[in-house]
Amino acid sequence: MSTDSKQYVSWFRHSSPYINAYRKKVFVILLPGEAIAHENFHNIAHDITLLNSLGVKLVLVHGARPQIDQALKEAGLQAPLQQEPNGKLHRQLRVTDVESLNHIKKVVGQMRTDIEATFSMGLINSPMHGADITICSGNFVIAKPYGVQNGIDYAHTGEIRKVNTEAILAQLANNNIVLLSNLGYSATGEVFNLTAEEIAAETAIALKADKLLIYSKEAGILDKEGSAINKLSAEQAQKLIDEKIKQGGADESLKNLELSVKACLATVTRSQVISYVDDGALLTELFTRDGVGTLITQEQYEQMRAACIEDIGGIMELILPLEQEGTLVHRSREKLEAEINHFTVIEREGVIIACAALYPHEDQSAELACVATHSDYRNNSCGKVIFEYMEENAKKLGIKKLFVLTTKSPHWFLEKGFTEGSIDSLPMEKKSLYNYQRNSKILEKII
């Protein structure tokens, strides 16, 4: 097998936990008009198609700002842009009169048709061959007029009144991709011009989406050196927003940060900002350990918690390589199900990346067992973190001594304060089960 083939196989294997984690999850993807116009859009469509094929439920929200600007310019119309008054988001709103609205509807209608055509490609030499994608558009967004603000009549510019989540979820249940534009509709039959950013954020919140994915020109939120910030908590992102506002900035990154924080502080677990310029940015962000964009999350990126029955598949996938090399004793699914209440896990992006189990005994000792870390995370202190957590948890349970049985990791435990013990120091029930053929080293620590 060639080196390239081996790398491909390795990548595919490492992506499988993410594939399993994302199946049947709802992602809302914001595609600004600039992304639609970019030469990389066909590749983006291929990547989105792949997500759909993997069972991800997708809602696409497309913008049209540059296309609308061009159409109005060609028509000799200059609809003024106003900074949103008293708004929480630093965005500009277009004052939409009747004539402007007619041009906007033409632009959006043509864009919708072109997007649908792109997702209908199925040539044999196309990455979308055999995908049979169905795109559904409709009056999913109910709008109301923005009204008169600070003496300015925004006319047919609107804001969201309601997102018809039941209708969208019905389409997603049929494995259809839902396509939303920047237009909303009122109960009186009117059409309103909204911002795609508002629609994306409010739709993600209403659907309680697992992710809001935002395409931007830059490769995420950039730091002062021009490199993408890998991840931010919502609190950190808000501090960055405050800094940008103080500096008088109103760039694309500020808008994307505000959208992400708004979503994450509501119902959306994670927002991610990626580049529409970089080919494959979506797949790299979702299916590799560190991604290429910026992740904004409402919670700790890596979450430590008690294991539950739904984690068994992830734990088995984590410990299987260690069982095969003899580092861990084999545990069947049935055994894991029976003992799951003894386990603690660290979860990252829906993937179990570390685990450990604690088995208390009557003599105030406890066995620390099945300490395992995913191979991709053995250099980022996950093992140390989960060990310290288990040690503190043991103290709370009144445990006085921890012991481990290990064949290949004695030095790791010795570095954590363990000393060599003997079979005679084991609790009676554990002593009777000791496997002399395996000849595990016994290490213990007074806590």
Image: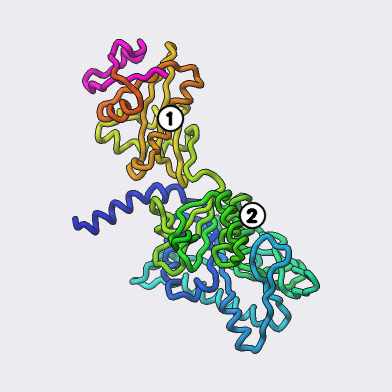
Along the horizontal axis of the image, is 215 left or right of 72?
Answer: left
Task: Report the residue marked by disc 2.
Answer: 206
The residue at the point 40 percent across, 41 percent down is 353
Residue neighbourhood size for the residue with mark 2, other residues' Cα within 10 Å, grouped as few (<14), some (14–19), many (≥20): some
The residue at the point 70 percent across, 62 percent down is 87
Q: Nearer the viewer, residue 352 or 138?
A: 352
Q: Residue 223's x, y, as percent?
A: 48, 59
The residue at the point 29 percent across, 16 percent down is 421
Which region is colored magenta? 421-447
Residue 349, placed above or below residue 42: above
**Residues at marks 1 and 2, CA–CA distance in whole angstroms:** 39 Å
Q: Earlier in the sequence, mark 1 or mark 2?
A: 2
Residue 434, placed above or below residue 406: above
Task: Report the residue marked by disc 1.
Answer: 388
Question: In which quadrant of the rendered view does residue 90 lie?
Answer: bottom right
Question: Which structural element holds mark 2?
Answer: helix
Locate the N terminus and report the quarter of the image it occupies: bottom left
State whether residue 174 appears in this view. no
Nearer mark to the viewer, of 1 and 2: 1
Marker count (numbered): 2
